[in-house]
Image (cartoon, grey):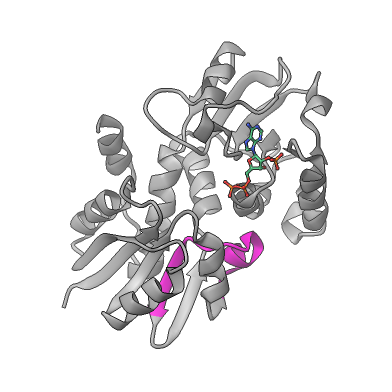
Amino acid sequence: MTDRYAVIGNPVAHSKSPQIHAMFAEQSGQDMSYEKLLAPIDGFADTIKTFISEGGRGANVTLPFKLEAYDLADDLSAFARHARAANTLGFIGNQIHADNTDGAGLIRDIRDNLAFDPEGKRVLLMGAGGAARGILLPLLEARPAILIIANRAVDKALRLAQSNQHQPDASQTVLSGHAYEDLSGQHFDLVINATSSSISDALPPLPDGVFAPGSLAYDIMYGKGLTSFLAFAEQQNAHRLADGLGMLVEQAALSFHIWRGVRPDTRPVITALRQD
Ligand code: ATR
């Protein structure tokens, strides 16, 4: 019998995950289907239960349900526990296993696809919400020399930095939280936009001149054309620009590996989506 998987969200119509997983399944000859499931805003748990009762083997979870997915899990990976959010569920017997592949997917995209190694670099992470929290542990594991978290509501940046100061993975990194205005005169090799600003075409209040020569500007969002942050980065002479399409494919590949034990080849999938 074909194994069933799904992406569950609200809205979910825009999701590229079915296309991505269909390409992975074809590449690796896996007998599986992958569909979109629209859950009512107050009906995530019921949607999951029904899907499991119909033979669902696993699911990706997208906005706004990543926190509920975490709450529903019987068992959490370190990344899910740390992010307090889950984007990948596996259903085994009566148990729901939760993982979070977003941050590791971002690091894979940066390191493997963009050939940028964060180790020893100066990194700026913008945002201190769920997305930033999901990225932080894998980013610390990549051992930057300096990691600054910047947020408009500075208390959130301070708390996020403080609560991760004693992570074993943070021992190579000077980690701190700041307001955007503190960044004047500082330069970063990697600037990651993990705020939700691009959704509304807004821009975090970054001072001029933060992009070091050779720097990479990365927006975890993607869309047609440049996001407002990437357009700003271009004006500011950031050396390279990347949107979150590579991260999307890499987090999907990590989910696929969790479910199927197979590592798909992400490059042709990223190339195909770029041409869409
Ligand atoms: P998500 O799960 O997408 O991270 P969230 O938890 O609501 O969503 O967090 C949104 C993040 O985007 C926050 O860090 C928010 O900053 P504040 O805490 O200061 O509000 C950030 N954000 C949203 N719009 C922004 C903008 N226009 N400029 C800068 N930061 C923005």
Q: Does the segment drawn in magenta span residue 88? A: yes
Of the 4 image quadrants, the one containing the N terminus is: bottom left
Residue at x 41%, y 67% (from the top left corner): 258
Q: Position of residue 237 (x, y in %)?
A: 59, 13
Outermost bottom residue: 94
Q: Does the segment drawn in magenta span residue 19? A: no
Q: Tell me which segment is drawn in magenta.
A: 76-91
Q: Is residue 124 above or below residue 6?
A: above
Residue at x 67%, y 38% (from the top left corner): 125
* Residue 226, quarter of the rendered image: top left
Residue at x 25%, y 33% (from the top left corner): 276
Q: Is residue 210 above or below residue 85?
A: above
Q: Nearer the viewer, residue 109 or 243?
A: 243
* Residue 77, quarter of the rendered image: bottom right
Residue at x 60%, y 53% (from the top left corner): 134
Q: Tell whether 174 sits left or right of 41.
A: right
Residue 57 in view: yes
Q: Nearer the viewer, residue 40 or 268?
A: 40
Q: Position of residue 39 (x, y in %)?
A: 38, 63
